[in-house]
Image (cartoon, rainbow, N blue to C red):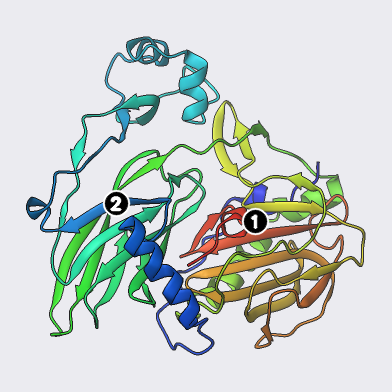
């Protein structure tokens, strides 16, 4: 199984893009807005998969409760076996749900997701006007991005924040939407609060928040891989790794925010077999120390690589570790990367559309054979690229 350098370095920390112009926006058609409004009128929410997070003046409407998964905080004297027995689940089930490899390695204060168990139902919280309601599209899972819908009065602007993550919201027909992302390793399962800064038509900014419950992702684990000695020397050169990371950091930190340049689902950049999945966890001494931040696709040298969605090329050069590298900014906080290419067919500043050829599969950089490493960043966090392949956004 071939793996890219990113599974092993585990230290790329790109900056979060900043808000900017709206050129290249994928505007919804009148037909799309009509269909969205018809769905909302029939269901009372943006789609059949939308789950209500919060609403304005809940006391004026029938009570709505939602059951959320339970999270246990480890205390002095706890063991995984005792915790599993307390909730009447198997030790293996508890370990798999929390991506644990060693049943003896837990710590006080650690938050453990208890699968199949629910906490006391919580009443849907209230939102201040001009917000009317908030929904989430499906579940929130480690290593994935989730879509948030907001309904608000006309002229409302919203920016969210989850820790250090900035979550911009964009208008779509009579709604607002944004993407919130969670890391596959550092963001632990449990409850989170998305803070919203809501600017009404009167110019006044009002705070609000909506609750999110993060589910554990299911990612395989394996001991860390070592390359042949000539390639391993590249990875062991800490200055080389740091310099290449910093180079990309500076490029991403300078990116302005831009509104989404795509609409709908992404396509795959290469129609081939997957040789390494997203989230493949590396372990050392029973501890998870990092993960594969993208998906690897088998390919012969020279096989065309296609743009999965519209965007603007922000990186197109050959790097020592990543080889022939391209990054595309799709707007909306979404950036995709393509490594180890034998030929780059686009330049920085080029605009691409879905299906455009951007490069060719190669075996450049830190690899053991020809393949494409495809990764996706949402609001500065790695997520499984397949999230936006299997889901139409907005």
Instruction: Using a 10 Å C-alpha cutoff, classify the residue at mark 1 as few (fewer than 14 neighbours), some (14 to 19) or many (20 or more).
Output: few
Image quadrant in which the N terminus is located: top right
Instruction: Using a 10 Å C-alpha cutoff, classify the residue at mark 2 as few (fewer than 14 neighbours), some (14 to 19) or many (20 or more).
Output: many
Give the label on residue 238, or none: 1
Image coordinates for residue 12, horizontal then vertical, percent: 57, 59
Residue placed under numbered mark 2 in the picture: 52
Asked if residue 270 lies left or right of residue 7, the reply is right
Report which quarter residue 315 is drawn in: bottom right
Q: Residue at x 81, y 48 (%)?
A: 273
Q: Residue at x 52, y 17 (%)?
A: 92
Residue 107 in view here: no
Asked if residue 225 lies left or right of residue 13, the reply is right
Asked if the residue at tag 1 contacts the one at tag 2, i.e. Cβ–Cβ closer than 8 Å, the answer is no
Give the label on residue 3, or none: none
Q: Residue at x 14, y 44 (%)?
A: 63
Image coordinates for residue 359, horizontal then vertical, percent: 81, 73
Asked if residue 189 lies left or right of residue 332, the reply is left
Name the one closer to the observer, 192 or 170: 170
């Amino acid at each position: 199984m071939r793996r890219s350098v990113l599974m092993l370095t585990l230290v790329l920390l790109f900056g979060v893009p900043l808000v900017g112009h709206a050129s290249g926006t994928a505007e919804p058609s009148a037909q799309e807005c009509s269909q969205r409004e018809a769905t909302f009128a029939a269901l009372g929410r943006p789609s059949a998969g939308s789950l209500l997070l919060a609403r304005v003046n809940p006391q004026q409407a029938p009570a709505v409760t939602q059951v959320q998964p339970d999270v246990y905080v480890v205390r002095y004297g706890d063991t995984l076996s005792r915790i599993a027995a307390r909730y009447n689940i198997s030790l293996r089930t508890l370990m798999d749900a929390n991506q644990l490899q060693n049943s003896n390695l837990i710590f006080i204060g650690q938050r453990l997701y208890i699968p199949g168990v629910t906490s006391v139902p919580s009443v849907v919280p209230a939102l201040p006007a001009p917000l009317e309601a908030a929904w989430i599209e499906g579940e929130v899972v480690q290593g994935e991005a989730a879509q948030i819908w907001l309904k608000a009065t006309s002229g409302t602007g919203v920016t969210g924040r989850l820790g250090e993550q900035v979550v911009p919201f964009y208008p779509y027909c009579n709604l607002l939407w944004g993407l919130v992302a969670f890391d596959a390793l550092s963001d632990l399962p449990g409850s989170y609060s998305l803070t919203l800064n809501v600017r009404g038509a009167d110019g006044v900014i009002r705070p609000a928040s909506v609750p999110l419950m993060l589910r554990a992702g299911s990612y395989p684990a394996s001991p860390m891989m070592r390359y042949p000695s000539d390639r391993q020397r590249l990875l062991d050169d800490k200055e080389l790794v740091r310099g290449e990371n910093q180079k990309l950091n500076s490029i991403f930190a300078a990116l302005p925010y831009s509104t989404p340049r795509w609409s709908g689902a992404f396509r795959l950049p290469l129609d081939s077999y997957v040789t390494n999945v997203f989230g493949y966890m590396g372990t050392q001494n029973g501890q998870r120390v990092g993960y594969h931040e993208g998906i690897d696709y088998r390919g012969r040298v020279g096989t065309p690589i296609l743009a999965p969605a519209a965007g603007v090329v922000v990186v197109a050069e050959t790097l020592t570790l990543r080889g022939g590298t391209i990054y595309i900014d799709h707007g909306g906080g979404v950036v995709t990367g393509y490594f180890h290419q034998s030929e780059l067919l686009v330049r920085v500043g080029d605009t691409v559309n879905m299906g455009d050829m951007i490069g060719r599969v190669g075996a450049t950089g830190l690899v053991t054979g020809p393949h494409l490493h495809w990764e996706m960043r949402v609001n500065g966090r790695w997520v499984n690229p397949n999230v936006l392949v299997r889901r139409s956004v907005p």
